[in-house]
Image (spheres, rainbow, N blue to C red):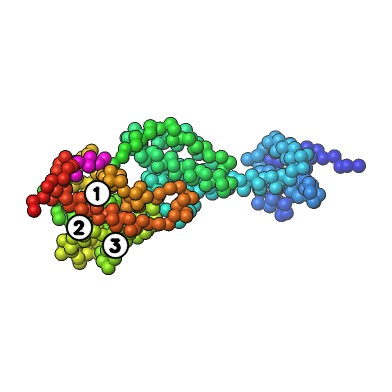
């Protein structure tokens, strides 16, 4: 015959005094209050584990933080788990692990892991842009929060002040990075779904604007304005070099003497400076070699062809050409990057091969499949194109081409 246990009362619990050894006060149904020699009182539930059938205890909490009535409620919940074949101790451990995982997966921690992956995929400059954007605009707001708690309205509200300032390009970048981070978290099982998918749609879109360039018939005036402008020789040479070589402003500003192959008349721009991530060979014409000869007395002692004013061991500012064109009155009419568009337009007008013309600007041609098979750099064709382009620039500057674009008759 089973021994009947008399339920405990609050008075019994309060009056229970510690002894030299710990002892239990049983309430029935597996619930007991353990009184320790120190005087602390702990609620325990004794049960058989569903799989092993071994007896064990699970702690429910301390008295008086957990009262008798609340302890009995806890026992009822634990018994429900046992009815379903769930071990209460394992259940509690799983919940604790899940909570710890949430706390250890703060947004900043997950983003940092994603950044490590990104560092191996993008150029150093791009990586710095991504890192700075997150540090300046995202981490201060939600960096310490569990990534599982991030919501779309929360992020949208945080980005509204940036939108109000008109920094739409920043908004676009932030939304792009956030979505990539969330997809990374989904793929690693940290979250179940991406809560930020589509948040870009609620913000004003930045209007796409091409880098403006003048019409081909205005080349005569542009060259004359550059020739007469009150600018330093390095800046003038930089603009003309960029125009002749059809390169990007940053590629020109960082040009080094060590990149010039005088034997083969090539400027070899290393892959890490190229948008395509591939070495780019630029054929050097008679005119570009003359630019190098003219600038050599100024920059021959520097590693850079176009050195900075105050530090010859550093390169010219990437925005130098653009700022100079603005001071010449070409704001909104011609940008430094737009010189590439001007050249490309004139190559099309001359009927040069599309593939070779695009290669002059270091553009990838075709889809990823065709690119994987076609590794031609069209160098021989580009030598002819670059020669024509440099000659055309020289003729425009020397007056052989009139402001209307027609050729003048030269005196014999």
Which numbered dot is residue 169?
Answer: none
Residue drawn at (37%, 50%) of the image:
355
The picture places residue 139, in percent across and down from the top left corner, at 42, 45
Mark nearer the N terminus (3 vs 1): 3
- Cα separation between marks 3 and 2: 13 Å
- Cα separation between marks 3 and 1: 25 Å
Mark nearer the N terminus (2 vs 1): 2
Q: Residues within 10 Å of mark 1 (few under 14, many from 20)?
A: some
Q: Is residue 205 among what the camera can see?
A: yes
Which numbered dot is residue 287?
Answer: 2
Q: If the image is split into quadrants, where does the N terminus sit?
A: top right
- Cα separation between marks 2 and 1: 23 Å
Identify residue for label 1: 319
Identify residue for label 3: 266
> What is the span of residues highlighted in magenta in the rendered image?
212-220
The picture places residue 245, in percent across and down from the top left corner, at 26, 54
Q: Is residue 126 among what the camera can see?
A: no
Q: Badges 3 and 1: C-beta atoms under 8 Å apart?
A: no
Left or right of residue 351, residue 187 in this image? right
SS for callout 3: strand
Residue at the far bottom in the pictured view: 263
């Amino acid at each position: 015959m089973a021994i009947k246990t008399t339920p405990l009362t609050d008075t019994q619990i309060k009056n229970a005094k510690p002894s030299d050894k710990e002892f239990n006060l049983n309430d029935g149904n597996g619930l007991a209050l353990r009184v320790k020699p120190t005087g602390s009182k702990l609620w325990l539930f004794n049960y058989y584990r569903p799989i092993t059938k071994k007896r064990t205890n699970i702690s429910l909490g301390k008295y008086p933080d957990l009262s008798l009535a609340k302890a009995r409620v806890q026992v009822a919940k634990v018994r429900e788990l046992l009815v379903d074949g769930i071990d209460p101790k394992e259940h509690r451990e799983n919940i604790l692990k899940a909570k710890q995982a949430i706390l250890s997966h703060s947004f900043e921690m997950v983003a940092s892991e994603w950044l490590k992956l990104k560092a191996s995929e993008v150029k150093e400059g791009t990586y710095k842009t991504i890192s700075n954007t997150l540090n300046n605009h995202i981490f201060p707001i939600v960096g310490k929060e569990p990534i599982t708690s991030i919501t779309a309205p929360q992020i949208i509200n945080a980005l509204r002040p940036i939108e109000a300032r008109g920094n739409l390009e920043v908004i676009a970048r932030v939304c792009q990075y956030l979505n990539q981070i969330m997809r990374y978290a989904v793929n690693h099982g940290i979250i179940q779904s991406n809560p930020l998918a589509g948040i870009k749609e609620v913000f004003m879109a930045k209007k796409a604007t091409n880098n403006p360039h003048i019409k081909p018939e205005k080349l005569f005036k542009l060259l004359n304005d550059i020739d007469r402008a009150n600018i330093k020789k390095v800046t003038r040479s930089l603009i003309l070099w960029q125009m002749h070589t059809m390169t990007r402003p940053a590629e020109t500003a960082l040009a080094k003497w060590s990149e010039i192959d005088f034997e083969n008349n090539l400027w070899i721009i290393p892959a890490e400076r190229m948008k395509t991530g591939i070495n780019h060979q630029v054929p050097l014409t008679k005119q570009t070699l003359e630019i190098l000869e003219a600038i050599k007395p100024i920059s021959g002692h520097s590693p850079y062809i176009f050195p900075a004013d105050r530090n010859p061991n550093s390169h010219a500012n990437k925005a130098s050409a653009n700022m100079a064109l603005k001071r010449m009155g070409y704001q909104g009419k011609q940008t430094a990057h737009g010189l590439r568009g001007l050249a490309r337009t004139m190559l099309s007008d001359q009927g040069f091969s599309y593939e070779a013309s695009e290669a002059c600007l270091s553009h990838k041609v075709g889809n990823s499949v065709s690119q994987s098979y076609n590794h031609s750099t069209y160098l021989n064709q580009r030598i002819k194109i670059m020669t024509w382009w440099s000659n055309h620039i020289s003729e425009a500057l020397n007056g052989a081409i009139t402001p209307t674009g027609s050729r003048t008759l030269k005196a014999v």
